[in-house]
Amino acid sequence: KAGVTQTPRYLIKTRGQQVTLSCSPISGHRSVSWYQQTPGQGLQFLFEYFSETQRNKGNFPGRFSGRQFSNSRSEMNVSTLELGDSALYLCASSPRGANTGELFFGEGSRLTVL
Amino acid sequence: GENVEQHPSTLSVQEGDSAVIKCTYSDSASNYFPWYKQELGKRPQLIIDIRSNVGEKKDQRIAVTLNKTAKHFSLHITETQPEDSAVYFCAASLTDSWGKLQFGAGTQVVVTP
């Protein structure tokens, strides 16, 4: 079974631009969560989607948004980029509804904002 | 909201010794406590988890204990090996919100031969 796939793996943007990151979950997994990882703040929850609905949202500004498609693939968007948005963005999928809480993480999209 | 504190931030142990990492959480409603291991340049991976109706869980050389009254849980690694070197994250959530984990800041474990 293929793992969680995130694209692009690396990208460089300048302040004020916007970026869209994509995540393909493990086949059969209907829940997708997004996390921001930085050396200073660790792993911070952004949002969780299940069946195309946002189920939970973290404490991030409205510049951060996401969506999930009917095939469970998910995208997150960050508008008006700031230097502090430089981070590794991790997507994780899980078979929500099964009796397990394990999150399967992708390798991440490393965003650098200049 | 939930807040998870993790200690120590770094831990250096001799191969064969034990390592203990401790976490505390603030929200008494949290009922699911996983531990993730992240090797350098790799993705986080679940190594063990525990639910609030269980006080202890073991899996080979790793074990997790939970004290609901004190709101703290710990990871124990026995007979450490060099491949145990990694960053370990504790987390807390609700079982009906699996995907929304509140992570601790992480512990860098270095196992020296």
Image: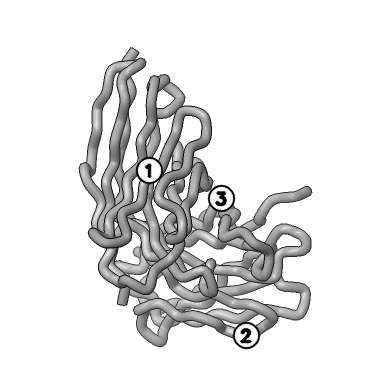
Q: Is residue A5 above or below residue A16?
A: above
Judging from the image, what secondary structure is the residue with disc 3 in?
loop
Give me the disc on residue A53. 2
Q: Quote the CA–CA distance across marks 1 and 2.
A: 31 Å
| Disc 3: which residue | A107
**Residue furthest top in the image:** B113
Question: What's the residue type where badge 3 is placed?
Answer: Glu
Residue in the picture at 36% in, 35% down = B76
Q: Quadrant of the C terminus of chain B?
A: top left
Describe the element under mark 2 as helix, strand or loop. Answer: strand
Q: Is residue A39 visible?
A: no
Look at 70% across and 70% down and name the residue there: A30
- Percent position of residue B84, x then y: 42, 28
Q: Residue at x 66, y 56 (%)?
A: A5
Q: Is residue A3 above or below residue B2?
A: above
Q: Is residue B33 visible?
A: yes
Residue A3 shows which numbered tag? Answer: none
Residue A43 location, quadrant: bottom left
Residue B112: % across, % down: 31, 17
Give the residue at mark 1: B88
Sequence-first disc among 2 and 3: 2
| Quadrant of res A70 | bottom right
Query: Residue A37: where, in percent of width, then height?
Result: 39, 58
